[in-house]
């Protein structure tokens, strides 16, 4: 059978693929009826998915093997369908022996999960989640040989045929039927007390894979303060017999730009558990680590060896002057192995007290394994200092125990009104919805890599918003002000690093990248050289009321307009290819006039990536603009009444 004909299998042929001996065949459609899920039960559970009558998932088997029984080979007791205010349709299948299977169909994709109602505890031996994709779609995967990192580069394959059996990848993972303009992402949501999901190429299809439960751990890796798994059990998890298991998710779109505003993973997450959330405030932060705390030209000692009270008071002053809500104080303020042992050079209480008087909150960095030795003691101490948040680093795992740590930290921090920025961690899967004091996650190859290699270039910058960002917020840490062309860039560490791409490319990240808590990665000295840029960075929010993707192509370019109140912000980015894209302002309300402050690449930006043009013009919904972007270029627009 030819690849193209395989992709266009219709509903009528599914009977012959499955056979008609199924105990039950069930269907579920999305509210817009573009997505159709077929479920067949006959000694095993098999499902397939069609989008606009075209098969995007061939019959794929799912099951969950517990120590008590295998969920997947029981008979159906009953099934029910419901709809939820046109947001999604739901199919609940109740089986013998106290378990259920739930399917949901949204316009943005489909998901399923197991529910169990057993007394006592159970041991999850294994899970089967097959993803049997038709044809030979292209793929963009963050491949990994381990279960310890989500910060790798994405690898493009023109066909899944080119991917060897045994290759493992993180999720979300993108598959692109370019000839049919259909994109399929494999992902997960609502992961609690359970390991995170990877996918692996196996016998021509992709299957879910999980890190098994740790049997033996010891301290090692970075600084000898990371809990490293040395031996694993023969099961995935020990858990409650009465529970909901994680959602297995397929995000499906027929336009690249639609992925830029897909929030299916968040929609599937458990609702918020914190009763009082008024103290949780999004915002931007000054930060010292990326630029090695260097303040060239100032008359105060700076650099990593001078991270003291005087230096941090300067960062507080900078944040307050430019309406930044926070200062992120990174590694070095305390002992890596005991947060209660403070750096003798730094009066952290004085810095935090002075910052509070200037309406600047302080986040403090810490090591996950360190605070988990005595979580209450560690967080009580950090709270007593007056900090408003913590940056928790070096989990380097997402087995069941590590996922439990993340939940325990989020919950304990919320009790103390502390916000949390997770680093060295797995990708988000909705925990930040349940605990909104989680304001960001790393789990992305971010700006730190500019210090070491060439991997986070504009090609990478135009992949992550179409794949990684669908999982949830990402702490890329943008804001580089020493901007370099492809020819001029070189990694620098230690010292003052540069960013790859133009100045406007970097500014656009503050609109395009979702980040509840956003760093300004570069030195305050650099920002203050450019009052017009600092005006933009002071005003751009980190959360918005409305998002409108205007244009986008995976790995190539993206243009997004976002609204906060009556103000709009537009971000535009291109990869290393210079391009010009027509843009209109139809997203603005008709009949109203606005002022647009526009930052675009200068005509010389292909030679000097720091060159940009700034202008202020009147615009309305009829205005049209030709966005000219240099190689690695971009544009940023601030629109206000």
Image (spheres, rainbow, N blue to C red):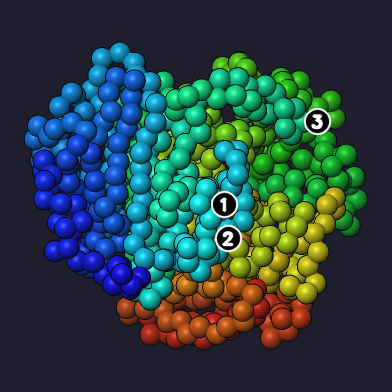
Whether 549 is drawn above or below 215: the answer is: below
- Is residue 633 at all visible to an observer of this figure? yes
Residue in view at x 57 percent, y 51 percent: 143
The residue nearer to you, when weighing 221 against 528, is 221
Secondary structure, mark 2, is strand
Q: From the viewer's perspective, is the residue at label 2 or at label 3 nearer? A: 2
Q: Residues within 10 Å of mark 2 (few under 14, many from 20)?
A: few
Residue in view at x 61 percent, y 27 percent: 229
The residue nearer to you, when weighing 328 against 278, is 328
Q: Which residue is mark 1?
A: 143
Marks 2 and 3, the one that precedes in the sequence:
2
Q: Which residue is mark 3?
A: 346
Q: Which residue is mark 2?
A: 155
Secondary structure, mark 1, is loop
Q: Residues within 10 Å of mark 3 (few under 14, many from 20)?
A: some
Marks 1 and 2, the one that precedes in the sequence:
1
The percent coordinates of residue 187 (x first, y second) are 41, 49
Marks 3 and 1, the one that precedes in the sequence:
1
Quarter occupied by residue 481: bottom right
Q: Quadrant of the N terminus?
A: bottom left
The residue nearer to you, when weighing 324 against 382, is 382
Quarter occupied by residue 122: top left
The residue nearer to you, when weighing 219 against 16, is 16
Evaluate if marks 1 and 2 touch, with contact meaning CB atoms under 8 Å apart: yes
Q: From the viewer's perspective, is the residue at label 3 or at label 1 nearer? A: 1
The percent coordinates of residue 468 (x first, y second) are 50, 54
The percent coordinates of residue 63 (x first, y second) are 30, 36
């Amino acid at each position: 059978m030819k690849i193209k004909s395989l992709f266009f299998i219709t509903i009528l042929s599914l009977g012959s693929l499955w056979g008609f001996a199924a105990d039950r065949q069930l269907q579920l459609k999305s509210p817009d009826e573009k997505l159709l899920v077929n479920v067949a039960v006959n000694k095993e559970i098999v499902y397939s998915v069609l989008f606009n009558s075209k098969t995007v998932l061939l019959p794929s088997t799912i099951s969950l093997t517990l120590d008590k029984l295998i969920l997947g080979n029981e008979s159906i007791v009953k099934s029910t369908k419901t709809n939820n205010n046109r947001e999604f349709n739901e199919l609940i299948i109740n089986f013998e022996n106290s378990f259920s299977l739930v399917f949901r169909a949204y316009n943005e994709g489909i998901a399923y999960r197991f529910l169990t109602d057993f007394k006592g505890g159970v041991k999850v031996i294994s899970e089967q989640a097959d993803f049997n994709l038709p044809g030979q779609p292209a793929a963009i995967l963050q491949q990994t040989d381990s279960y310890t990192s989500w910060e790798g580069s994405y690898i493009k394959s023109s066909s899944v045929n080119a991917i060897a059996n045994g290759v493992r990848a993180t999720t979300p993972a993108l598959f692109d039927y370019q000839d049919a303009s259909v994109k399929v992402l494999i992902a997960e949501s609502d992961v609690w007390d359970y390991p995170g999901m990877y996918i692996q190429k196996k016998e021509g299809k992709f299957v879910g894979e999980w890190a098994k439960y740790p049997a033996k751990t010891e301290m090692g890796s970075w600084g000898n303060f990371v809990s490293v798994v040395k031996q694993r059990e023969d099961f995935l998890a020990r858990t409650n017999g009465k529970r909901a298991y994680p959602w297995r998710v397929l995000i499906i779109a027929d336009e690249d730009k639609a992925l830029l505003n897909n929030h299916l993973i968040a929609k599937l997450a458990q609702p918020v558990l914190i009763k009082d959330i008024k103290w949780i405030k999004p915002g931007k932060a000054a930060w010292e680590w990326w630029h090695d705390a260097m303040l060239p030209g100032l008359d105060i000692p700076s650099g990593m060896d001078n991270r003291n009270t005087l230096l941090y008071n300067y960062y507080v002053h900078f944040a307050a002057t430019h309406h930044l809500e926070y200062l992120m104080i990174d590694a070095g303020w305390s002992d890596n192995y005991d947060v209660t042992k403070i750096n003798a050079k730094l009066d952290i209480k004085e810095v935090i007290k002075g910052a509070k008087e200037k309406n600047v909150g302080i986040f403090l960095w810490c090591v996950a394994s360190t605070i988990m030795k005595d979580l209450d003691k560690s967080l009580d101490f950090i709270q007593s200092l007056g900090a408003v948040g913590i940056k928790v680093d070096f989990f380097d795992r997402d087995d069941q125990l590590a996922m439990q740590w993340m939940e325990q930290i989020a919950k304990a921090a919320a009790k103390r009104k502390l916000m949390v920025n997770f680093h060295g961690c797995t990708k988000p899967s909705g925990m930040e919805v349940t605990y909104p004091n989680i304001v960001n996650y790393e789990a992305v190859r971010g700006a730190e890599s500019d210090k070491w290699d060439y991997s986070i270039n504009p090609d990478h910058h135009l992949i992550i918003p179409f794949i990684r960002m669908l999982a949830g917020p990402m702490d890329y840490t943008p804001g580089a002000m020493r901007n370099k062309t492809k020819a001029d860039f070189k990694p620098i560490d230690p010292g003052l690093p540069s960013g790859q791409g133009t100045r406007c490319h970097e500014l656009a990240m503050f609109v395009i990248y979702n980040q509840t808590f956003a760093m300004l990665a570069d030195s305050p000295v650099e920002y203050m050289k450019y009052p017009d840029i600092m005006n933009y960075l002071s005003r751009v929010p980190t959360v918005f009321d409305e998002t409108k993707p205007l244009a986008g192509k995976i790995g190539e370019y993206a243009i997004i307009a976002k609204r906060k109140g009556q103000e709009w912000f537009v971000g535009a980015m291109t990869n290393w290819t210079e391009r010009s894209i027509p843009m209109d302002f139809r997203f603005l309300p008709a009949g109203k006039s606005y002022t647009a402050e526009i930052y675009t690449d200068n005509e010389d930006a292909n030679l000097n990536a720091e060159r940009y043009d700034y202008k202020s013009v009147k615009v309305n919904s009829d205005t049209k603009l030709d966005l000219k972007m240099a190689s690695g270029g971009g544009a940023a627009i601030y629109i206000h009444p």
